[in-house]
Image (spheres, rainbow, N blue to C red):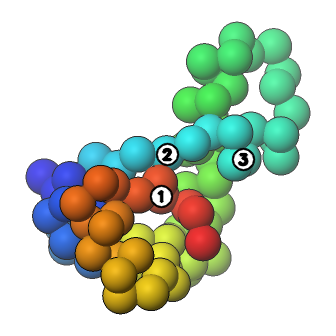
Amino acid sequence: MNFWPFDGWCPDASRSVIAEVYPRLWNNEYPREGRTGDQHDAYSVARWMRETDAADMLRRQFQPQLKPDELTQAQLEGWILGLA
């Protein structure tokens, strides 16, 4: 299990990852289709991750383009997966 980014920015592909996400980044991109708000949040995150992975771009999301001091602070305080 990898707690991202606390256990490192580049999790091993063979390990499960726990990361903070902000569904609002993606939930307006997909039709709600009768889901509750919580259901749609979960759906939106899962669909974004699937689409991003299919485009071979998911690994890049685990390595945000931050300045060295920002990386140090984020490793201590955390970061939201999907923020550039």
Q: Looking at the picture, which amino acid does disc 3 mark?
A: Trp
Quadrant position of residue 63 = bottom left
> Does residue 17 show up?
no
The residue at which mark 1 appears reads as 81
Q: Is residue 80 above or below residue 23?
A: below
The tag on residue 21 is 2
The tag on residue 26 is 3
* Secondary element at tag 3: loop
Q: Looking at the picture, which amino acid does disc 2 mark?
A: Val
**2 or 1: tag closer to the N-terminus:** 2
Residue 20 position within the rendered picture, expressed as x and y whole percent measured from the top left:
40, 45
Instruction: Please tell me which residue is depicted at 34% across the width and 65% down the height of the picture.
Output: 74
Categorize mark 2 by other alpha carbons within 10 Å: few (<14), some (14-19), many (20+). few
Q: Is residue 17 above or below residue 70?
A: above
Q: Is residue 44 left or right of residue 4?
A: right
The tag on residue 73 is none
**Discs 2, 1 touching: Cβ within 8 Å:** yes
Residue 1 position within the rendered picture, expressed as x and y whole percent measured from the top left:
13, 52
**Discs 3, 1 touching: Cβ within 8 Å:** no
Q: Looking at the picture, which amino acid does disc 1 mark?
A: Leu
Instruction: Please tell me which residue is depicted at 83% across the width and 46% down the height of the picture.
Output: 29
